[in-house]
Image (cartoon, rainbow, N blue to C red):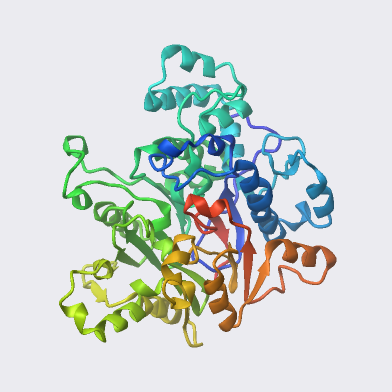
Amino acid sequence: MHTSKDSVATQEINVASEIGTLRRLLVHSPDRGLGKVVPSKAQDWLFEDIVHLETMRKDEYDYYLKILLYFLDPDKIRGRLAEIDADAERGFFKPDHPDYFHSDAVIDIQRLLAEILEDEVIRTKLISGICAVERCNFNAQNHLYSYDPVELSKILISGSLPDRRMLFAPLPNFIFTRDIGIVINDHILLNKPAKPARTREALLAQYIFFNHPLFAGYRDRIIEIPDNEHHFLLPDGDVSRDYTRSTLEGGDVMMVSRRHLLIGCSERTTLYAAQQVMRILFEKNVVETVTIIKIPKKRDYMHIDTIFTQVKKNVWVLLGSLGRLGDEAKRRDVLHFFAPRDVSEDLRIMQFFKGLEHKPIEIENLEDLLTDISRNDLGCTEPVKFIYSGNNEFPFGAREQWTDSCNLLALKDGVVIGYDRNDKTLEAFRRAGFEGVRAEELLHRFESGEASPETLENTFIMLPSAELSRARGGSHCMSLPLLRDDF
């Protein structure tokens, strides 16, 4: 397959923890499709609100990219901040611009798509497949063949033509690259989205993972989740959906140690899919333990990474109402025993082990599970600490979880990036010994030599988030790690 001179070649892919130093990841910058989301279709397209695209890009997501580059590929950015920020055209951030940063460590999925579209056979197949999914007419399909690979990649993602006409719906959730797949040790698990609005994302991801040179050495280690063999006979409103349908998104999958994988059963991921993934991983000897976490099927929670993520070897952030604190508060309340069933009672945790000789065990609460991971999977000898969303104060725990207080990306052990708006959660981080620093300030410290990514410890990097938080996904969602150091 012909690829451009800037194509990313095959590189190592391996992720065995949530906190090992991050070396390579897939991202996707907000594209022109996000500016086309209309109020009447926002929730159908799985966006919580309409956003102001230029603010989201220039004042928020660009800081995310600059921080990622400083940690993962500093030669692309160190000493250039003033020059980059002075460019009103933002060429540094646009994958189709001559001034684009072209990193092999911080990789935009649009760039990979444009590169595989240089192959005529792939281009023909992908256009046909997407036009079938989107029910395009024959003339619209033929018209797509007239575009060069770079422009075509933008159209297939954004749904809109260069003249701003919309050919089909945008993919506003494509910025959440975590959901299209997940790296499990040296294997890649592709998702099966629950909502029709994400079908095109899954198709684009499938073509990229199976065709781009970056993944050439891993083709036989790409896992696709099988459907129920009679899935086409299942009614759309099947009340036993969890037990018959196969849907899974990457926000419900966490690689917490080389031997141990977490899978959430949520609004978007079914028990059937979790079982299929567990069976395949055990058969392939990829992991030894799989823990299934069944969470309430509420829009508030969506995926397990919206209710907890790992910060450090011995530190986790989580939503208290679904943790042990919530349980203990209810046990002290006599009304709890007579009141209607609470959603937190829908939280169940079962741990499964490879081999018939090991019986599954039930774990009572999240804190017990996460403590066990820190101590027994990661060998932590320090006390395990929990930082609670909103400092576990009413009503801030729920409010700040809604704006992704628990959805953090660890750049390395003890250094995470999250949103700046969750004040009570940040207060809890500071009480736990972390510094909260705004992304802009930290970048200036890096440029001046006052600080460096290598020496930074116990830090919460505060990302501007007025528009990004409207989309209901944080920095953990906006990342698909491809390589982390062993921990």
- Quarter of the figure with residue 7: top right
Residue at x 63%, y 29% (from the top left corner): 150
Q: Is residue 260 above or below residue 111?
A: below
Q: Is residue 394 left or right of residue 458?
A: left
* 391 to 134, vertically: above or below: below
Q: Position of residue 330 (x, y in %)?
A: 27, 80
Taking the view exactly as shown, the residue that stands out farthest to the top is 139
Q: Quadrant for residue 434, please give it.
A: bottom right
The spot of residue 424 in percent (x, y) is 53, 73
Can residue 105 be seen here? The reply is: no
Quick one: 145 or 6, which is closer to the camera?
145
Q: Residue at x 49, y 14 (%)?
A: 142
Q: Quadrant of residue 371?
A: bottom left
> Is residue 77 left or right of 226 when viewed as pictured?
right
Q: Is residue 119 above or below residue 405?
A: above
Name the quadrant of the C terminus: bottom right
Is residue 215 at all visible to an observer of this figure? yes
Residue at image position (16%, 35%) is 233
User: Could you say where residue 326 lies in the image, as x and y percent from the top left?
Assistant: 33, 78
| Whole-percent x, y for residue 459 in the image | 63, 73
Q: Is residue 342 left or right of residue 120?
A: left
